[in-house]
Image (spheres, coloured by chain):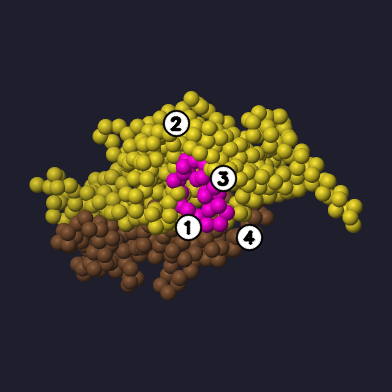
Amino acid sequence: MEDFWAFSLWAVRIWLYLVISLIMIPAMFGFSLGISETYMTILVKTLEWATLKIQRAKTEERTLNMSASNSLILRENGSMEKELEELRRSRPKSSVGGDFTFSDCFYFTRRGIESIVEDEVTQRFTSEELVSWNLLTRTNNHFQYISLKLTLVYCLGIFIRYCILTPLRLTLACIGLSWLVIGTTAVGFLPHSSAKSWLSEWVHVICYRICARGLSATIHYHNRENIPKKGGICVANHTSPIDIVILCNDACYAMVGQVHGGLMGLLQRAMVRSCPHVWFERAEMKDRHLVTKRLKDHVNDKTKLPILIFPEGTCVNNTSVMMFKKGSFEIGATIYPVAIKYDPKFGDAFWNSSKYSMVSYLLRMMTSWALVCNVWYLPAMHQQEGEDAVQFANRVKSAIAHQGGLVDLQWDGGLKRAKVKETFKEQQQKKYSSMVVGDDSNSD
Amino acid sequence: MGSSSSSSYMRNIPQAQVLIHETGFSAAHLLRLYERFQFLDKGSTGELRAQDFTAIPSLALNPIGDRIIGSFFPPGQEKLDFPSFVRIMAHFRPTDPNRSRDGTQLEPVNSRNKKLRFAFQLYDQNGDGNISRAELLQVLRAMLGVQVPEEQLQSIAERAIQEADLDKDNVISFDEFRKSLEKVNIDQLMSIRFLK
């Protein structure tokens, strides 16, 4: 019995030494031993092989044809005006009785039925459908037995992911987070000096790098010359809480958010000891002026780190960018847009908060193949003359969407939980009424 | 996706073969409709409620969105199962041009007549077979909101009824409705084209 415990203790020690030397030290100092690269190359080759096998099997039998674009119906792109104009061609115009036909409802009915079949908003709050299966159980929608080899690879994948990779990743994540708390608290004891800020940045980056290894994250940064500078605001599209880890691997940011309890609260309190972040109490968040003022104060202090904000306000599934809330764009600071695009082949990064809790989401992340993403730093943007906050926000949003290859939507991410505002319905009614009764300028 | 076999997946869909025969949807389209049905059915109850429809933003802002949702739920019924959902969606399939005019065959659910009936019941909320002035005013109010004052609304309704009401009984029957829309290309306006 004692031998068993001695042996397992010895095994755990060896395991930790390996982890530290092979993964943590390179992560901390920013160089790479090439282990993850090799893993990724093998992974990519395996997935390509699997895709070929599946496609070959697909062409052999008659199967349901799934289009990669996910589009189910053909939408007439004619506007309301155009279509209703056509219906009125044969009728004489009358200034008294307006211009209404019974067939007007056809347009609205058809539009309504089209949205029942397929709409561009609700699909953004669930995970992206993959073109080809990536050997994960969770993305397996229509699996049918194809070949022994494929099933063996799939089972091998399960073993590797759950028995080898997940414990490794969990260890790294725990180490990373605990170091973050300890390190930032320790730095917090130092007096204010440039050494303190340098140390604090170093501690932050190291811990985030360890956490990134804890997710097997491979991040490609592009255009690093545009990296956000102090006194500015960095905005990015939001897919999951892991976005923070992704961005902080490369630079240091001041976070903005609500004060939480529990483990998150512990992290928040520790982090704020070493360098200033902006944490709000729940009650304070409702007061927009207070929020704006605190952000302004932070931004105006040129020694403080750039603020990181996700203006969508909620997690979206990384196929589109939803409406940016104008709050951060009213402060008048330089905006540094960043586009983040995950590669869904290796793991689905989207956090569907209505389906998964934070813990089960993190476990799902740790049992995926890996996390591959591209980060593009876009050139800084300023609010232009005569441009209001909403227009500025839309301009930044379009730039991010364009760079990341995402769909630029005008819809509010808050529609995930809330109903659409009545004002949108009024817009439709206004448009229609101008067709029926005409504008004031038209009547005589 | 991984490879799929239509027959094995179809087994999960209630009354699949009956629906394919009745509505004319292909197996592939029926499958996609089923996936959409399950997607809208957030609680995985197997049935949809009105609030599952109002959760679709572009439907919620449609001026007659409530009426469209209402046509899925006959009076007194609060839940919608998949076969009923498909039967109503079938109204919006494009009309089949090659269908033979065989008198003994049942009228297909996506015929011009059936499409007109669907539109008619959007107006005729109390289901008595006639669109009264009051019902027409209700629809106009829904579609125009507060943009148009009451008197103007009345005159619009007046004109519309006068033009269509052939037997001068001040209500629009289904036949009068149909006659007034003789020249309109119903198939194009009331059809959803599914991609292959």
According to the picture, the residue beneath numbered tag 3 turns out to be A185
Q: Are marks 1 and 2 on the same chain?
A: no
- Residue at horizontal 49 percent and vertical 48 percent from the top: A315
- The residue indicated by pointer 4 is B12
Instruction: Report the mark closest to the observer, 4 or 3.
Output: 3
Select label 4 or label 1 by which is in front: 4
Closest to the observer, A44 or A94: A44
Mark pair 2, 3: CA separation: 25 Å
The answer, for residue A7, to whether it is visible in the render is yes
Q: Is residue A8 left or right of residue B134?
A: right
Badge 2 sits on which subunit?
Answer: A
Cα–Cα gap, marks 1 and 2? 57 Å
From this view, report whether residue A207 is shown above or below residue B113: above
Helix, strand or loop at disc 3?
helix
Instruction: Decide if residue A281 is on the left or right side of residue A355.
Output: left
* Chain on which label 1 sits: B
Instruction: Give the class, few, some or many, for how many residues have Cα within 10 Å of label 1's Cα (few <14, many ≥20).
Output: many
Q: Amino acid at mark 1?
A: Ala
Point out the residue furthest to the front here.
A191
Residue A372 visible to an observer of this rendering? no
Foreground mark, 1 or 2?
2
Residue drawn at 62 percent across, 35 percent down: A218
User: Do callouts 2 and 3 point to residues on the same chain?
Assistant: yes
Q: Are marks 4 and 3 in contact (CB under 8 Å)?
A: no
* Labels 2 and 4 positioned on one and the same chain: no
| The N terminus of chain B: image quadrant | top right
User: Callout 4: helix, strand or loop?
Assistant: loop
Query: What chain is colored brown?
Result: B
Mark 4 near mark 1, Cβ–Cβ under 8 Å? no
Q: Quadrant of residue A220?
A: top right
Q: Residues within 10 Å of mark 3 (few under 14, many from 20)?
A: some
What stretch of residues is rendered in magenta? A254-278
